Image (spheres, coloured by chain):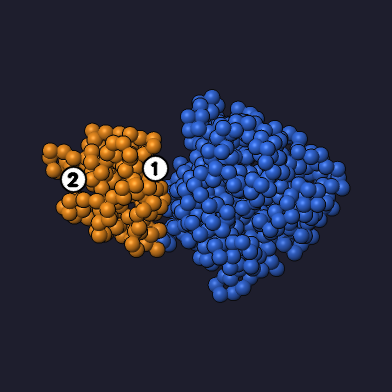
Chain colours: A orange, B blue
Amino acid sequence: MRIALQPIGDVPREVLEDLIEDLKGLGDASILDPIPLDPAWREPKGDQVRADPILDGLEPEGAHRVLGVTAADLHTGAYDFIFGLAKVQARPAVISLFRLGSTDPRVSRERVAKEAIHELGHTLGADNCPNRECVMSFSASVDAVDRKTAAFCGRCRPTIEFSAKRLRT
Amino acid sequence: MPEEWTGPTEQLDEFRFVIPKSYKPTMRTEGLIFADVKMMEQVKKDFAPEQVANVATMPGIVGRAMAMPDIHWGYGMPIGGVAAFGYDEGVLSPGATGYDVNCGVRLIRTGLTENEVRPKLKELVDTCFHNVPSGVGEGGIVKVDRKDLQRLAESGVRWAVENSYAWSEDPEHIEANGCLEDADFSKVSERAIARGKDQVGSLGAGNHFVEIQKVDRVYDEAAARAMGISQLGQVCVMVHTGSRGFGHQIATDYIATTEHAIKKYGIELPDRQLACAPIQSPEGQDYWKAMSCGANFAWNNRQLITHGVRNAFKSVLHRSPEDLGMGIVYDVCHNIVKIEEHTVDGKRWKVAVHRKGATRAFPPGHPETPAAYKSVGQPVLIPGDMGTCSFVLVGLPTAMERSFGSSCHGAGRQMSRKAAERMFRPNEVVKALNEKGIYLHAASKAGIVEEAPGAYKDVEHVVRVAEGAGLTKIVARMVPLGVVKG
């Protein structure tokens, strides 16, 4: 699977390069030229950005999946904040670095990797998973992100493998 | 008796297991099971592979005796079984066709979305329940007299069109256009006629249902669009039922007939349940004509239920079914014999393809694939068990050479109805469904537990294996919003 990483606004280069490494289990990632954060996506009050319209603006540029990466704080109508959002069984996903930071850079990198895999997992057809250790479990806090692993559980893995295999044919 | 089937299998590739001819001296051809390693372990537990080997011994069999990934133990031939017999020297077997002749699935689309339907869901399900009689022996939507029954059994869905139970374009979206033309009512017994008369437009018990569903995954946008599935959350209605007491009686009658025929024609079989008659014999021809009546009855049955469902939507939503876009996506048979042409080992054959718990899956461009689906392939409808998901697939070109253009038909039981009754409690099943946002209206409590989701194999696994094996491609997934059960 070819994954396009789409920096939205100012995103540190090393985060994207770490992601290329950390997403190897899913496919080959490459970095697209950054696009600006559309001011229309910003909420008139507060500093947050709506995630849904971002997904519509993401272009995979020939890749199978596109993962938007932004430093902005994302939310949807249903949730006050989110770590990421994806269209299920479709191309686009986005993650926000805003709430994933830690004083330990290794922890930050792990969190970003897990949320990236989680959102790309949705684009490959997996739902949120009730297994707390599975990367597809829904995380409402960074603690929950830290508790889960970066791996798919036995139920989610076949879904991911099926979709990934299909992309190869 | 050993714990599980221990016969030999050779793994051809990731999704194909062969039972070699050497397993039984009477086998005329190999057996072939479409499954993956994990599934094969489960399959061996219920001895269904033995039934595949048994079918391989039948006279006139062309190509291999096959089983789809949802294979499980059945009467004579396993559910999920596919076998083709040469038209000139082969046989027809009512047991290998199944008791519920033309049990099948129909999908009706709507232009509605989940948000529009949710507030009226309970009312819609209850009205569908009211409009469509369910349960064992319940009367049908219409009472027909003998003349009507003959007309509908001989002319298929044309009868429903003539009587305004069908739109004029409905037959185009039904396998075989909703009619097997060779049907001859004089070959149907009085007992079958008596049982069938009051059951036209009735759901029946068992795993039969009417389900209001929403599309929750689209895997192939182009194919989905061709079927009028344009967005996630779009509401569809799935109807799963067959030929009721009429078809059951036809099967029963001709199983008795063929049990005599095997003696008359000197046919030796490893299992009496596979009783059959040469296609060209009077017994074979009579069964073919009677089975065709059963198939036509089933199509009219699903048509009348469609009529009941359309009316339910009309009365609850105060909009006409036409305005609601309630056209038929497709209607497929699960238990049927069809006369088809196939190429086996480079030779063109006219064959009687028995599909029992298996679905025809013709590829894009096949002459029998309806015009609307010429570029995407024939839709294959896979009903899930209550509370899980159903699938729309399309036939792949490779299915023609690999499986006589056939694929799976459902999840396949992994627990007997009795075992399920012991395992589950009706109230808990209903509660679990409610928690998922699914409203259930059932005629009997037994029906709820017999068909509880845990009693079946994982339908998603089955359709993935079918795609891996090159039989069908997954197009969309639907999840239930409301269920009417017999």
Above or below, comparing residue B204 to residue A29 in the picture: above
In the depicted view, which residue is nearer to us: A103 or B444?
A: A103
Above or below, comparing residue B67 to residue B198 in the picture: below
Q: Amino acid at mark 1?
A: Asp
Report crowding for label 1: few under 14, some 14 to 19, many 20 or more residues within 10 A (C-alpha): some
Q: Residue furthest bottom?
A: B346
Chain letter for mark 1, please.
A
Report if residue B358 is visible in the image.
yes
Q: Position of residue B92 (x, y in %)?
A: 69, 58
Q: Residue at x 56, y 65 (%)?
A: B375
Q: Position of residue B14 (x, y in %)?
A: 40, 58
Report if residue B72 is visible in the image.
no
The label nearer to you, 1 versus 2, is 2
Q: Position of residue B50 (x, y in %)?
A: 53, 51
Q: Which residue is tagged 2? A: A109
Q: Which residue is tagged 1? A: A127
Disc 1 secondary structure class: loop
Separation of marks 1 and 2 at Cα, in angstroms:
23 Å
Q: Residue at x 59, y 65 (%)?
A: B374
Report crowding for label 2: few under 14, some 14 to 19, many 20 or more residues within 10 A (C-alpha): some
Q: Amino acid at mark 2?
A: Arg
Disc 2 secondary structure class: helix
